[in-house]
Image (tube, grey):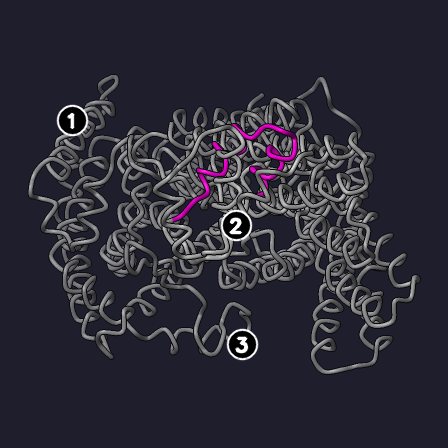
Amino acid sequence: MSNPVYGKKAIASRNGQKLPVALWLLIIGLIIFMVWAPFQAGLFNGLVSTFEKPIYWAAIIGSLLLLVGIFAFFNKFKLEDQRDWTAIAVLLLPITYMLALISAASHFYATNAVLIQCLYAFIFIIGLYLLQNKQANSIIETTIITVAYLTILFGLLNWLGQGRLASSIVGWFSPTVINGQYNQAVWIDSNGPRLASVFQYPNTYAAFLMAFFFVAIFAITRSNKWYGQAIHAFTLVPIVLSILLTLSRGGLMFLPIVFIVLLLFLKPAKQVLWILYCLIAGVGTLLIAKPVTELGQQFHLGQIGDPAKGWFYVLGASLVTAILACLIQRYVAPRLENGMSKLTEKKFSNLWLPIGSVIVVGLLIALFLGTNLKHILPGNIGERLENINLQQHSVLERLTFYKDAAKVVKDYPIIGAGGGAWASIYEKYQNNPYTSRQAHSFVMQYLVEVGLLGFIVFLAFILFIFYKYIRGYMRSEEHERDSYFVYFIVVFSILIHSMMDFNMSYVFIGMLVFLGLGGMVAAMDNQPVKRFTLKPGNVRVIYSGVLVITSVVLIFTSIRYIQANNAVIKGRELMTTSNDFNEIKKPLDQALDKRSDLPDAVLNMNALLQAGYEQTQDESFFTADYDLLISALKKEPYDKNIYNQLIILHQKKGSNDQSYEVLKDNADRYAWDMAWYEKLIAQSFELGYQALGEQDNDKKEYYFKAGLDAYQHVVDGVEHLKTLPKGQFQGNPFYVTPQMALNAGKMQYMLNNPAEAANILKQGITEDLTEATNQEIIRWYLAALQKTGANDQPLYDQFIQIDPTGKDAIDQLAQMTF
């Protein structure tokens, strides 16, 4: 028989319970964790060493909390109903990431991803059991909302010039505070200053703000106390203002979509209140947006010294909003409830206002995008709105990322390319030379990392929870729904926005989502699973044992990774302060001993060994360095930095042919790296010319053919870039450099193809005839023309005037035979 948490029996059974000590320890620990986490740059998995250590600490804290949770919930591990089985199902998510280690593009990133997925599973399990307790649920929900409001306050303090004050409050526990200032709380890019708060990325902050804007509105309508209504209403204007200050077009696009979907879960009277509060917050924000935005922009561009007067606008509008909300809840809300009670009883009554809202939102979008109404917003916000269309560069670039991600999935279809694969592998698959270590879509990035198998497991897990939660929600009374609806709002808002951005790369955001999913499961329409019922005693021991072992392994693994990270930092510092080789090597050896796939440790050790070889020419240094790099590449086969160091090592040894093979064999992995291809073409010429001198025709043709193929790759790439849609940015520079043209032209000339040589060399000629490389190109070009019986007399005359000796040089080249 079904026994949903939403039912009266379940709720009544929790009233008046005293929380045991273990539960209080878990709650306090979770509160501290949730306060600490956002100020670590949101625990961004940015795939660089700067962000790693806080994530390892998060894994340790999450594991310790789970151990406390196992003690607190031991008697609840029965696997008798669907809710309990989701606690088993969530373990499949890290397991799919473990499977992906088999084909991982980067063992280092993939291992980190396993830790993160284990943390998410732990948070989900804790939430599932902890939030079934009414008192604990209330405390954790209040904590999440409070942390969100503090994050919003922190962002505005940075925008309005009190960044150092805000940073001093969190600086003692946040490594993101550098020289007294939280790093990149306000972004400055081509669009001007953009608010990013703790996340250092405006778009993710916009997704976070969107979720808690709706949480705040929900909390107003739920609260029975005037001060509760006032507190939540007070945050509405700061939240909407912050969304505008992020300049996130995605945030503005998804906000109405999420709003309309959430309306479907409310009675008509609540729908009216939500719409009313959105309008009040919107109007209040528009009245103050221009001065507050301009003050912050001028401050961050160094035009004014103190924009603090902007607080008068923010606090004034917030206070008015809070007063209006209290009055509405006191006088308007009860009348709406009574006046619309008959309408509520009608079938599909909750659909009318959302449908109407779609029309109204459509009209508002048309007005803002198609008329001068957008000019009531500050200049850059209005400009960003004006640029919202399917042909803008950010949309086109995202579509390109998704197509390129699909290419990766095609090559790694079943178990994926491992966690962090996109950052390692995207250069091989990219359509044009952009730089993006994130796929800008949680869905596509997840597919790349764990393939179809992992994605199907994740999708089934999420859809089951949503289905069961919504089913239970629809069957329950309104007062029973409110206890867990906050979790649904947060999870739904973030996941919808994450379809077009990398919000889930922030571990703190992922924690919110999985804690929210745990809350949804705690409230879902629950049913027994008799078919899979096991003896409770056996279940407790096996399940608890698995969780304990996993937690302990995660704790010790994370500690080792932190120690390895610290050892690299120590070794790097010693490189600048010590001349003792063994003293510097010791911490780097420790780092590699604790984590052999740590790229920073490999690269720093490589620098040390290369310096030793360069100074002493001792073969043991070369051998040790070579073995180190080759071993590292077995686990990091796409790490360009390691390949570059291997190339340099071969060159120091004088093994230019081996250096060349590394360049040539890996060129397809960096198809749009202009510097890589310039080196490849140059070395193809040098080694081919050397073979020519040795009269080794086969080798000459091998090197020259490879070099000309590389040159043609660049030419084809340049032509391909011309086909990009008009609004799409190319990304990094990619063109035929004069040096490429010179070397490719020489190779064609030495293959006795003077006409082809002339065509190539002509492309490399620039206007500055005094530049050395350009002069060499011209000499070879004119010699190639002379050999074919053609000429370029104007260029010839101009060149001879600048370099009278050029005539003899051209004649000599023209007379050469190969």
Q: Residue at x 30, y 74 (%)?
A: 161
Whether residue 488 sits left or right of residue 351 in the image: it is right
Q: Residue at x 51, y 53 (%)?
A: 773
Residue 496 % position (x, y): 41, 35
Q: Is tag 1's residue or tag 3's residue first in the polypeptide sequence?
A: 3
Q: Nearer the viewer, mark 2 or mark 3?
A: 2
Q: Is tag 2's residue or tag 3's residue first in the polypeptide sequence?
A: 3
Magenta stretch, residue numbers: 743-766
Give the Cα distance between marks 2 and 3: 60 Å
Task: Specify whether residue 764 is in view.
Answer: yes
Residue 291 % position (x, y): 14, 64
Query: Disc 3 residue type?
Result: Trp
- Are the residues flagged by discs 2 and 1 in contact, CB closer than 8 Å? no
Whether residue 58 sits left or right of residue 159 in the image: it is right
Q: Which mark is residue 359?
A: 1
Q: Nearer the viewer, mark 2 or mark 1?
A: 2
**Residue linked to disc 2:** 776
